Image (cartoon, grey):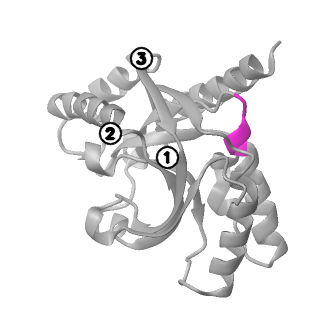
Amino acid sequence: MHIIDTCLAEQSKLFEKLLSEALQRDVESLVGPSRDELARPCSTLVMRPQQVLAESLGARIAEVEALFPGQLYYRADNLHMTVSALPDVVPRSILHRHLRRSIASHVGALRALAMPVGGFGIIGSAVIIKAYDPEGLLARMVRCLVADIEEEGFAMAHLADLHMKIFWITAARLITPPSAEFLAYIGQHQGESLGVANFATIELDQTDSIFSAQATEILEKYNLGDFS
């Protein structure tokens, strides 16, 4: 089997497993942090989809919201793909310097990425749109970054977690118990194709879990494939 086919099959299998597990849980256990808790500051590596795709995904998410209101839905302007959560980054700190050096050393191996997106799923308390890493290059970069940062004495593996294997764009946060109809809808649309995300940059951001504009500061921005 070709390496791309193998990577996609492994990612699809994991997405399916996570959705199956979520659908077997009690709906109360699917409820995640409150709005206030989601507003707490955090540090993260992210990629932003191109505007045309973000608007298209935002419109699709709005359709879901119209059918199943009451959750915290993302809009086109705060849609993003988390590459990895990070330990709290204080600008110009030792950790910040380590991250800058490590990220810069690895982005050169990543050419601009075209990642197919589509199919709804559930991971934790988030309704997600799956993003496929065709050759596994982004996941490999995250694993290398984790190894670098942990070698410097900072715990990161538990933050990177699934991002060492799969990636997604969060569509909504479950802040109230989802209805059986909502869960069935997610299952019915787990194979829906929604386009291709083209990523040319990666950001180190200080933000919050809903990626609100007022809380988001770009600390560093890197061009993929840039060895400089």
Left or right: 155 with respect to 45? right
Question: Which is nearer the eye, 140 or 225?
Answer: 225
Q: Is residue 158 above or below residue 154?
A: above
What amino acid is labelled 1 in the image? Answer: Gly
Mark toward the start of the polypeptide (2 vs 1): 2
Q: What stretch is highlighted in magenta?
A: 135-139
Cα–Cα span, label 3 and label 1 = 20 Å
The residue at which mark 2 appears reads as: 51
Q: In this view, does 165 lie above or below 149?
A: above
**Residue shown at 26% from the left, 28% from the top:** 60
Cα–Cα span, label 2 and label 3 = 20 Å
The residue at which mark 1 appears reads as: 124
Q: Nearer the viewer, mark 2 or mark 1?
A: 2
Question: Which is nearer the eye, 107 or 12?
Answer: 107
Cα–Cα span, label 2 and label 1 = 27 Å
Mark toward the start of the polypeptide (3 vs 1): 1
Measuring from the top left, give residue 186's x and y in whole percent.
38, 25
Task: Specify the quadrant that holds the C terminus.
Answer: bottom right
Q: In this view, does 59 lie above or below 40?
A: above
Label 2 with label 3: CB-CB less than 8 Å: no
Measuring from the top left, give residue 45's x and y in whole percent.
55, 59
Mark 2 surroundings within 10 Å by alpha-carbon count, few (fewer than 14), some (14 through 19), many (20 or more): few
Mark 1 surroundings within 10 Å by alpha-carbon count, few (fewer than 14), some (14 through 19), many (20 or more): some
Name the element at disc 2: helix
Is residue 123 at all visible to an observer of this figure?
Answer: yes
**Residue shown at 20% from the left, 34% from the top:** 62
What amino acid is labelled 3 in the image? Answer: Glu
Q: In this view, does 148 lie above or below 165?
A: below
The residue at which mark 3 appears reads as: 192
Give the dominant element type of the magenta stretch: helix, strand or loop: helix
User: Does residue 85 show up magenta in the picture?
Assistant: no
Mark toward the start of the polypeptide (2 vs 3): 2
